[in-house]
Structure formats: structure tokens, C-alpha cells
Image (tube, grey):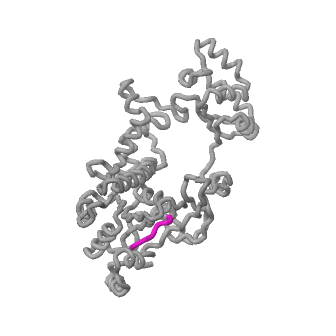
Amino acid sequence: MYDLLVGLSVIEASSFVASPTAGLYCAQFGAEVIRVDPIGGGPDYRRWPVTAAGDSLYWENLNRAKKSVALDLARDEGRELLQALVRATGQFVTNFPVDGFLSHDTLATGRADLVTLRVMGWADGSPALDYTVNNAVGYPMLTGEGPAPVNHVLPAWDLLTGAYAAFALLAAIRRRAATGQGGEVRVPLSDVAIGTVANLGGIAEVLYADADRPRLGNTVYGLFGRDFTTRDGMRTMIVVVTHRQWSRLLAVLALEEAVAAVEAARGAAFAQDDGARFVHRDALMPLFEAAIGNRDHADLAAAFDAAGIVHSAYRTMREAARDPRLVADNPIFAARDDNPSGFAYPAAGAFATMPQLDRAPPVPAPRNGQHSERVLAERLGLSSGAIARLIDAGVVGIS
């Protein structure tokens, strides 16, 4: 964690991935992020993966460094407390619907400079999930091979939306600092997805060609890149993104003469042209398959590393979790044995590294309602007696 956002407090009422991610990123840079959930947890409180006791490792990690207030949001008293917390704090992150008791207009009554960041499915308010938005923008029909669509397992649009939402929240706060004006910022998953497609040239590409891009399996579009199998059966991905890498790849594999013969036969020049390497991959790939298939992985990996060639063997996530370079020796991680689940493991903090600043270790996630009493006292000025009555009435939950 870093302290760049110390002094900024945010109320978060959200679930699943995108909206909690926005709060997580703010918390990792020092903001006080106060989650408000139903008593007993929201719809994602037990989401898989879970421990044998049913504690969600997913929830535990998306909500690190946050505080937790538990309210009965089915009752007017609980909803009014959440509204009061939002108005008292001035910054609000949510994926609740546009209308209802958490609408921006309702919340801004009495707090005109309120900044609301609302993560949505579709811009018109219709519900959507990462996996349905991904289908809508066409990526499953570009993935894999054959006629059937292939979904990927990474919720990329949720994560991009969460990151963009955190950025948009800070931009709106900066605007308020300059003008005194609050407002609502809406970030729909659908817009992040189709906007990203456009930013990568995808919309222009299909409209220009009046055709969809072919499905290429593990081949990288427009570059020389694909998976290969070494002599000892290791499958590795090799991708060339610079002309120097191309020349060094040929040298390591002793393929200069063979590739020159392809150039002569095809009337092509590969040294300075990514696209030509891609177009003529039918002639190039068999050469590389044979050369790589004659080398053991350890020998090849050492030669590639020495030459600055980008490659990586395929492995399981279990293997990645035990890779010192990725986890144990990586300063973004720190071991935690005080997680709510009781399971001790390395926890991730801020992904950015600032060498000039000290990095604080990641903070564990809260238990549901862990900070209810303190937050209600500090933010709303409620007395201990008033809070006790709310707890007794079942309006406020504590851990």
C-alpha cells in the first residue's frame, strides 16, 4: 500500500468484481474505503473460490484494506443510514441501479458537491455481466479454432471497468476541487468493452474489411507469435515484437539460411516487416517447429533469455503461485496470517511500485460489520447508546 490518497474517504456499496475493484485500487493507494453491505454479507460474500468453512477467498482479496459497515438495507432505517454516510463523506462508489434509494439525485439532496461513481451493465441500465458483454462485442468468435465460440476465464471487462472507474472517480474529484461541482459518473461494462475494441482498431478493422478476423488459435494476429513444443515435451509461447528480436530468434535457432530461402521463394522481406512474417506464417512455422522441436526447453529458454527473446512456458496457476519471481520475491506481495478466512498466504498490494516511497504491506479484508460502530460514531456522530439501540433493533450488524 501507498499513502498517496490519504485523506480521501469513499463509501462503497457494491458486489461482484468491477465496482469492488475500483474501491480496492483506491484503498491500495491510501484512501479510506468503507464498504456498506447487508448484515451477513451481500450476494458475493460467499462467492467461489471458498475454503472448506465457506469463506470466500475471492471476497477476501477484492476487499483488502477496506472497512466494513453492515446494515439492514431492506429497512428504511438501514437505507437512511447508508444515505447519511454517503452525504457525510462526499464520495460514493456503487453498482446499484441508477434509480431507487441510491440514485445520485436522491443522495445529492443536501450534498450538492457529491461525487457518485456508478458501475453499470449496459448504458441504458439493463443488467450485464463480463461474460455476456464479452459475447456481445465478439471476442469469443475470435478465440480458439473451429465453429464454436470460446469464452475466456479472465473477467477482463470487469477488471478494466474497475480500473477505469477508479480513474474516473479521481478525475471527478479533481474537477470538484477546481469548480466546486459534484456529479455522477456512469461507467458501463458495455461501453468499456466496445470502447476498448475501438481503441485497439477492431471496429475500424471489420468495417474497413467488411469481414471478421479469422480465428487463429494461439497464433498472434499480425505478428510472429505462436506456441511450440520442445523436444522434451514442454509447450512454450514465443512472440516477436521487434525487428531485433526477429534477427536474434533466427540466430538462436540457426534459421537464417532457411528463412532467407523462404524470402527468395515468396518475394518477401521479413527483417523489418511484422505483417510479412504473419502473412507467410504457413511457410515459416514448419521451420520453427522443427528447430524448436530439436531442443530441450531448459537449453532453449537459457538461449532465449540471453538473446532477449520473449517467451514463456505454459504452466498451471498452482505452479505460478509457487514461482518466487512472481510471488515470493515480488515486493507487491506480503505474507498474511490474519485473513478473515484464517488461511495464511501471500496477499497482493498495489501493483505499481514507487521506489522513492516506502511500501506498506497489504491490509487484510474486514469481517462483515467489523467497523460499524466506529464509522457510525465518527461519520454520523451517533452516540454509543444510539448505536447500541440500532444494533439491538437489527438495523446495524457488527462482527
| Residue 23, position as x, y percentages in the image | 43, 60
| Residue 361, position as x, y percentages in the image | 59, 64
Residue at the extreme bottom: 385
Q: Is residue 339 above or below residue 382?
A: above
Image point (38%, 54%), residue name: 174
In the image shown, does 221 or 171 lie closer to the viewer? 171
Residue at the extreme front: 178
Tell me the quarter of the image containing the C terminus. Answer: bottom left
Q: Is residue 234 left or right of residue 363?
A: right
Image point (66%, 27%), residue name: 288
Tell me the quarter of the image containing the N terminus. Answer: bottom right
In the image shown, does 116 or 260 lie closer to the viewer? 116
Image point (40%, 57%), residue name: 19
Give the extent of the magenta segment.
64-69
| Residue 330, position as x, y percentages in the image | 64, 55
Q: Is residue 365 left or right of residue 106?
A: right
Is residue 177 in sight in this rendering? yes
In the image shown, does 212 or 357 lie closer to the viewer? 357
Q: Is residue 67 magenta?
A: yes
Residue at the extreme right: 299
Q: Is residue 122 magenta?
A: no
Image point (31%, 52%), residue name: 127
Count of marks placed on residues: 0
Q: Is residue 78 above or below residue 240?
A: below
Is residue 231 in sight in this rendering? no
| Residue 220, position as x, y percentages in the image | 54, 33
Q: Is residue 12 left or right of residue 265?
A: left
